[in-house]
Image (cartoon, rainbow, N blue to C red):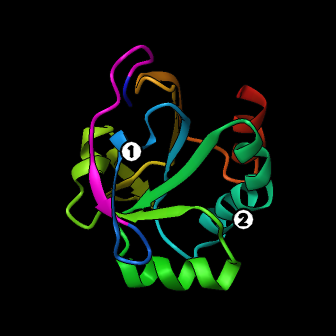
Amino acid sequence: MLETGTKAPAFELPDQNGQLHSLEEFKGKKVVLYFYPKDNTPGCTKQACGFGERYPHFQEKSAVVIGISKDSVSSHKKFEEKYNLPFLLLSDTELTAIQAYDVWKEKNMYGKKTMGVVRTTYLIDEEGTIVKAFGKVKAAENAQQMLELI
């Protein structure tokens, strides 16, 4: 996990519609950047729906919400449509942002070691600096936690 006070690594990734987005385009806004393991899994769905429900409140505070996983653009599109998600879901199949933000880690699943995304959320300020970093996030509580922080 990256430390607070460091410059957020730049990225350019496709969203659920295949359109490229970079961190740079959100300069001047707060960015809630959350990394999650997989579309349509129970924890990830709770987390995404929590952000979706509270999205108007984030907008009122001039903040954008961006979710990133290694799922494909088409997987993100289905996830967005199924749960009516109003924010960007970026596809990082090459793991460039996932590794740059240090969230690709060894995990222990039922005694078997695998590599995967550790659920992590960053708050990035208007200048592109990480002001808060949360590792091993509780999916159901994350959106409210971030909203209160902003």
Depth check: 77 or 142 in front?
Answer: 77
Using a 10 Å C-alpha cutoff, classify the residue at mark 1 as few (fewer than 14 neighbours), some (14 to 19) or many (20 or more): few
Which quadrant would the C terminus be assigned to in this image? top right
* Type of amino acid at the residue the image marks with label 1: Glu
Query: x, y percentage for residue 122?
Result: 50, 35
Query: x, y percentage for residue 59?
Result: 71, 46
* Type of amino acid at the residue the image marks with label 2: Cys
Does the magenta stretch mainly form a helix, a strand or a loop? loop
Q: Earlier in the sequence, mark 1 or mark 2?
A: 1
Q: Is residue 21 left or right of residue 51?
A: left
Depth check: 105 or 76 in front?
Answer: 76
Q: Is residue 51 left or right of residue 18?
A: right
Report how far apart the C-alphas of labels 1 and 2 lie in the structure.
Answer: 24 Å
Q: Is residue 130 left or right of residue 94?
A: right
Pick out the residue farthest to the top.
Answer: 5
Among the 4 quarters of the image, the one containing residue 58 = top right
The residue at 53%/86% (across/down) is 78
Decide: is 78 above or below 132.
Answer: below
> Where does the magenta region start and end?
3-14
The residue at 77%/42% (across/down) is 60
Residue 49 disc label: 2
Query: x, y percentage for residue 16?
Result: 44, 74
Depth check: 133 or 109 in front?
Answer: 133
Decide: is 62 above or below 35.
Answer: above
The residue at 40%/85% (across/down) is 74
Residue at label 1? 25
